[in-house]
Image: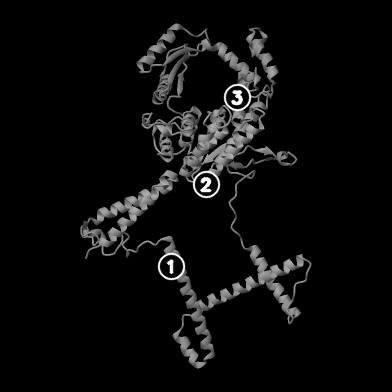
């Protein structure tokens, strides 16, 4: 006796040749796994590959069954798969047969009751319709019909009462019958009200959230367009990305979400005495707008003059000018891009290209003369093609990768946006959250060939780092010789600078002349050479004193820095106990006065 697994080859009735069943079975399993992986990816381009693979797999399954005596890959009798119309046709026929059987069973039951003793014998022959299970099912059906009729009657009476008219009662109803009917109606209404209904899909807006404040959470297995690419882009552009915590949540299936800061209940009309959870907001476009508005409010709240990121945030939102039409146009493009999200990638690309080819014929950006949220929203509609593979997918949809296609305004605009350093960093932040192995995470591919070498064992990729945009530095103080701790620091900075095709700066921190010597500086450079480290540039902190001073003044004027003369031991204790310094609420004007006093070199200024 042989089994399916024992068969090596069989003659196919279809083509008269020999079919290698184990090889064919392995091919079918490989196709099945490939289809499953494509479905799991969620990408529109992957979904387009599924139908031809399914068709090929069905052909091979039939070939296997024909060669194996009608037995399929699963060891069961093979049956041709039905189309949707055939399935519906069979379902209708099955329902008709069931209805006819039920009618026949009812007629047989009635006839048996009228025929007396003879009917009893007939009933013995037709035991199924009168079995305990059938009778119980019929009783439930009758009870359900009675409840439905009672509920309808109750609704009709309620409608009549609302209109001011008295519902008509049957002529022969007594008070007892009326009370009984009312009781049944009330019972049916109560049952209907008590029956739990399926809750609609809800979005947590201003409600309690499991997300900590300013935590941006999304599913690492979602397609790139379902990740907060717009939100990360504006956070990088406004230099506020470090204000947010990026969280990976495999159980999140409702799109990206952002936990809001806790607030006083007075913000919602309360007495302001209780701090309540800020809730969360969902959706990439919504989160992006919040990040931009927060950049404006957070930067200007202390000084009123605006700080870092404010001007960029206002430009992205369109509020930098007083043009209401410009702001409305940006909002219109964002709404348009959001409305396209329900369509497939090919349809989105053609729609956006049709719009932009006309809009960008004589301009660089979609609205105005600089990058706005409208550009980011439409770029996201194209699949956020910052990576090489995504750009090729857009080109395939537009027609072909030829000169004519590359001269299209949409293509020129797409490549310009894709080359922006902030867009690349946002892409890496969105892609890098996907864990490939226990030690490595995914990295964005911005070119046809890998731009970076594989990570060395034990090393992790830099979060948000993109090739050509990484600068590391090794800042020794020339007041002694290098030790083993210095070697670890410099080798790590050297590795990342070379891996990402960036630069390594050796910056001597010569801010303490009393301890520094030329001997130590020469020794440090010599030791770096022995370690195989060659800095791209050697600088000195003292060369940038004036630049550092200008940045300090800028931060003070913007309300981002204050002067503090707290003794070191007290300051350390306050930091450990998370206690604000007494100078933290210092105004920019007071801080400026203390800064000038410090720079004067006077005895009073030495304390600062």
How far across and down, in percent of the image, does residue 538 sit?
Answer: 44, 13
State the residue lying farthest toward the bottom.
117
Which secondary structure lies at badge 1? helix
Residue at 75% in and 40% down: 271
Res. 539 visible in picture: yes
Could you say which quadrant of the image residue 194 lies in? bottom right
From the viewer's perspective, is residue 257 above or below residue 98?
A: above
Q: Nearer the viewer, residue 467 or 417?
A: 417
The quarter of the rendered structure image containing the N terminus is: bottom left
Q: Nearer the viewer, residue 463 or 274?
A: 463
Disc 1 target residue: 90
User: What distance separates the C-alpha of mark 1 from that of mark 3?
Assistant: 67 Å
Tell me the tag on residue 308: 3
Tell me the tag on residue 342: 2
How far across and down, in percent of the image, does residue 298 sit?
Answer: 64, 29
Could you say which quadrant of the image residue 562 lies in? top right
User: What distance separates the C-alpha of mark 2 from that of mark 1?
Assistant: 33 Å
Res. 43 visible in picture: no
- Mark earlier in primary sequence (2, 1): 1
User: What distance separates the C-alpha of mark 2 from that of mark 3?
Assistant: 36 Å
Pointer 1 with pointer 3, Cβ within 8 A = no
- Mark earlier in primary sequence (1, 3): 1
- Mark earlier in primary sequence (2, 3): 3
Q: Residues within 10 Å of mark 1 (few under 14, many from 20)?
A: few
How far across and down, in percent of the image, does residue 251 sit?
Answer: 50, 46
């Amino acid at each position: 006796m042989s089994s399916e697994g024992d068969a090596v080859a069989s003659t196919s009735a279809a083509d008269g040749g020999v079919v290698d069943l184990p090889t064919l079975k392995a091919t079918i399993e490989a196709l099945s796994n490939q289809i499953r992986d494509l479905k799991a990816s969620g990408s529109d381009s992957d979904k387009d590959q599924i139908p031809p693979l399914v068709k090929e797999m069905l052909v091979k399954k039939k070939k296997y069954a024909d060669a194996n005596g009608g037995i399929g890959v699963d060891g069961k009798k093979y049956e041709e798969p039905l189309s949707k119309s055939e399935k519906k046709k069979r379902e209708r026929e099955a329902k008709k047969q069931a209805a006819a059987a039920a009618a026949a069973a009812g007629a047989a039951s009635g006839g048996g009751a009228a025929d007396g003793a003879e009917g009893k014998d007939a009933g013995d022959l037709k035991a199924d319709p009168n079995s305990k299970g059938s009778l119980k099912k019929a009783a439930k059906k009758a009870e359900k019909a009675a409840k439905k009729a009672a509920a309808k009657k109750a609704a009709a009476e309620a409608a009549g009462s609302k209109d001011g008219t008295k519902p008509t009662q049957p002529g022969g109803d007594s008070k007892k019958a009326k009370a009984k009917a009312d009781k049944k109606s009330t019972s049916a209404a109560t049952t209907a009200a008590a029956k739990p209904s399926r809750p609609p899909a809800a979005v947590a807006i201003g409600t309690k959230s499991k997300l900590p404040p300013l935590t941006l959470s999304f599913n690492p297995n979602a397609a790139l367009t379902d990740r907060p690419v717009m939100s990360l882009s504006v956070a990088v552009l406004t230099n506020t990305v470090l204000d947010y915590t990026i969280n990976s949540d495999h159980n999140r299936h409702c799109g990206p979400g952002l936990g809001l800061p806790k607030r006083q209940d007075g913000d919602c009309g309360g007495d302001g005495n209780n701090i309540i959870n800020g809730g969360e907001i969902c959706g990439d476009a919504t989160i992006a707008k919040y990040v931009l508005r927060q950049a404006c409010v957070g930067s200007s709240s202390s000084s009123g003059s605006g700080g870092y990121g404010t001007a960029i945030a206002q430009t992205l939102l369109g509020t930098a000018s007083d043009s209401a039409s410009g702001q409305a146009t940006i909002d219109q493009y964002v709404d348009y891009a959001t409305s396209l999200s329900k369509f497939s990638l090919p349809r989105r690309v053609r729609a956006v290209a049709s719009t932009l080819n006309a809009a960008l014929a004589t301009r660089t950006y979609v609205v105005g003369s600089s990058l706005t949220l409208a550009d980011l929203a439409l770029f996201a509609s194209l699949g956020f093609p910052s990576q090489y593979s995504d750009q090729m997918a857009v080109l395939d949809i537009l027609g072909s990768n030829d000169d004519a296609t590359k001269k299209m305004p949409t293509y020129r605009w797409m490549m310009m946006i894709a080359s922006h350093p902030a867009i690349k960093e946002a892409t890496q932040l969105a892609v890098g959250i996907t864990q490939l192995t226990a030690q490595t995470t995914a990295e964005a591919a911005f070119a046809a060939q890998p731009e970076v070498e594989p990570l060395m064992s034990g090393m992790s990729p830099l979060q948000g780092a993109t090739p050509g945009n990484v600068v590391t530095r090794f800042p020794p103080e020339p007041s002694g010789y290098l030790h083993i701790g210095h070697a670890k620091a410099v080798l790590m900075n050297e590795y990342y600078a070379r891996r990402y095709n960036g630069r390594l700066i050796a910056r001597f921190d010569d801010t303490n002349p009393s301890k520094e010597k030329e001997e130590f500086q020469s020794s440090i450079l010599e030791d770096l050479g022995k370690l195989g480290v060659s800095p791209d540039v050697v600088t000195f902190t003292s060369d940038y004193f004036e630049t550092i001073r200008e940045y300090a003044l800028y931060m003070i004027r913007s309300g981002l820095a204050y002067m503090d003369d707290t003794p070191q031991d007290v300051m350390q204790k306050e930091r450990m106990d998370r206690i604000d310094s007494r100078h933290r609420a210092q105004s920019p004007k007071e801080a400026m006065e203390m800064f000038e006093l410090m720079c004067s070199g006077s005895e009073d200024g030495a304390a600062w």
